[in-house]
Image (cartoon, rainbow, N blue to C red):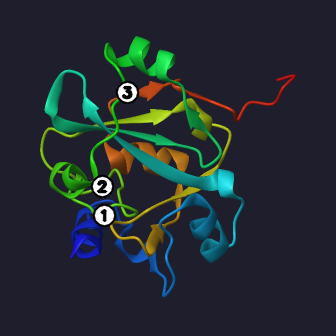
Amino acid sequence: MPVTAVREYLRQFGKDGDITEFSASTSTVELAAAEVGTDPARIAKTLAFYDPEDDGRALLVVTAGDARMHSGSFKRAFGGKARMLAAGDVAPLTGHPPGGVCPFANPEGTRVFLDTSLRRFDSVWPAAGSASSAVAMTVPELEECSRAEGWVDVTRGWQEENG
């Protein structure tokens, strides 16, 4: 059902036909990259947190597959500690099961942000509502389709040492 909701949601952007469903799991960056046939860094993973402004709703941060959350940067950006959603809260607060969380077709009030780790790519692959789906998008399409509130710099580990 979540893929159906994402497909319907993406129809308004003309991206509903770009969803790919796989027979194998794409629930981790490595599995998704193998199924899609791309570098793991190009998997746009959606991290789900309790919103520091209202812990009854989700705050989603979409990052590159090779990026790791930096708690101090998260706290500076959002004014509170980074607390990942408990397994039982993932589906109710994001509209999607674990492994399929994406920044599309989320419950009203869900806040979405994109991490700067994505800016180095022309295109990426976010999940599409299930643990075996993905959708190809340019980064500008991801920004538009996710209705992101803005860009944040809350990850580490992906920058080149001398860059």
Residue 58: horizontal and vertical position, in percent?
23, 39
- Mark 3 — residue? 82
Residue 65 position, x and y percent, is 60, 49
Residue at the extreme right: 162
- Disc 2 vs disc 1: which is toward the camera? 2
Left or right placement of residue 57 versus residue 31 in this view: left
Which residue is found at the position 48% from the left and 22% from the top? 71
Q: Which residue is mark 1?
A: 10
Of the pair 116 and 26, the residue shown nearer to us? 26
* Spot occupied by residue 81 in the image (x, y as percentages of width and height): 35, 20
Sequence-wise first label, 1 or 3: 1
The quadrant where residue 133 appears:
bottom left
Identify whether 89 is placed above or below 152.
below
Q: Amino acid at mark 3?
A: Ala
Q: Which of the marked residues, 2 or 1, is nearer the chain's N terminus?
A: 1
Q: Secondary structure at mark 3?
A: loop
Q: Which mark is residue 104?
A: 2
Q: Nearer the viewer, mark 1 or mark 3?
A: 3
For residue 109, the mark is none
Tag 2 near tag 1, CB within 8 Å: yes
